[in-house]
Image: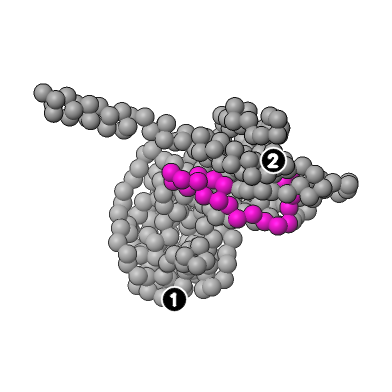
Amino acid sequence: MKKIISAILTAALITCAVQIPSLAAESWREAFVTRIMKVMSSDPTYNNVALTDLDSDGIPEAFVLRDGADGGISAGFTMNGNSISSIELPGNIIGTCLADITVYNDNGRLIFVGREVPRYSSVINYYKLMFDGKALTAQKILKSYVNMYPTVPYSDIYGRDFLTNGYPNRTKIKSFVDGYDSINTLTATNSNAKFIVDGESVEISGYTVNDSNYYKIRDIAMLLRTTASRFDVAWDSSLGGITISRGVKYTIVGGELSGERETALNVNQSGAPVYVDGEARDMLSYNINGSTYFKIRDISDMVGFTVDWDGEQQAVIIRTE
């Protein structure tokens, strides 16, 4: 009887674990509180916090900073899987740049711009903020760089004075972190577009994001493997990015053109850099359910094939000859 009861309890616990994924999704909050407490305990002069979702994955990046002449940033971190990971910080901005961010939409590409007013100066500096999952970089820009783009809804919060009698107050910090409410306006739908390569119909799964068709780079490489526009795809861990070698026959890794279509989609703008024949390219891509998808026209520009749209057939037309 004890074994039966034990088995029932075990099954119940497993069932509960499966049915409440939202608790796991929210685990970052408690982890952030603990990390902020630790940072502030080591140096209480850093008692301001900015929470801002630079990679649009629903979990913010956290930065602990301070006021003052230097306005330094003590630490940056985010959630990677089930653990906290540190963020490499730039040396050319002060912390308040992360407390005043506006997001602009350049045809689906989100541009994060931080506003910085240096102490003892009337000059306002603007920085394009870029986060690749490991490091935050800041490129100084003119405001006119983004004036032509519309802004998008964005959630970031900034707080200060988390100390009580010179020590970090966990209740204050927890209340601040719990007040964060992420906004992710990205959506994707299964693309119904047909695909025709050099006159031959082929099967490939893709998604429509912001009225453009996106496909896995490996699927396209597989389709063009024996054509004049062939190219190879790899991941370079030293660069932390995707490498594309034009004119090289694609190396099959398995799973290409699987044709699987998913309906529950988790969509985020990807921060993975792309290198074409060793040259860095500024490419818009999306991470959809764990895989990176590129706009088909961007792939054609990178590799060198022709792509057209046939409205009558509702088809993407690729010509490699």
Sooner in the amino-acid sequence: mark 2 or mark 1: 2
Region in magenta: 77-99
Residue at 41%, 75% (x, y): give it: 248
Residue 93 painted magenta: yes
Q: Circle 1 sits on which residue? A: 247
Front residue of this view, candidates 304 and 261: 261
Front residue of this view, candidates 123 and 193: 123
Front residue of this view, candidates 64 and 21: 64
Q: Residues within 10 Å of mark 2 (few under 14, many from 20)?
A: some
Looking at the figure, which quarter contains the N terminus? top left
Q: Quadrant of residue 178?
A: top right
Residue at 45%, 53% (x, y): give it: 293
Q: Amino acid at mark 1?
A: Gly
Q: Circle 2 sits on which residue? A: 44
Would residue 108 be visible to someone looking at this image? no
Q: Is residue 76 left or right of residue 73?
A: left
Residue most toward the left? 1
Q: Secondary structure under badge 2? A: loop
Would residue 42 be visible to someone looking at this image? yes
Residue 64 painted magenta: no
Q: Amino acid at mark 2?
A: Pro
Percent of width and height locating residue 286: 49, 50
Circles 2, 1 touching at the beta carbon (< 8 Å)? no
Relative to residue 306, is residue 257 depicted above or below?
A: above
Badge count: 2
Relative to residue 215, is residue 289 depicted above or below?
A: above
Percent of width and height locating residue 141: 75, 55
Residue at 28%, 29% (x, y): give it: 13
Q: Is residue 200 left or right of residue 290?
A: left
Looking at the figure, which quarter contains the C terminus? bottom left
Q: Is residue 11 left or right of residue 159?
A: left
Relative to residue 180, is residue 151 depicted above or below?
A: below
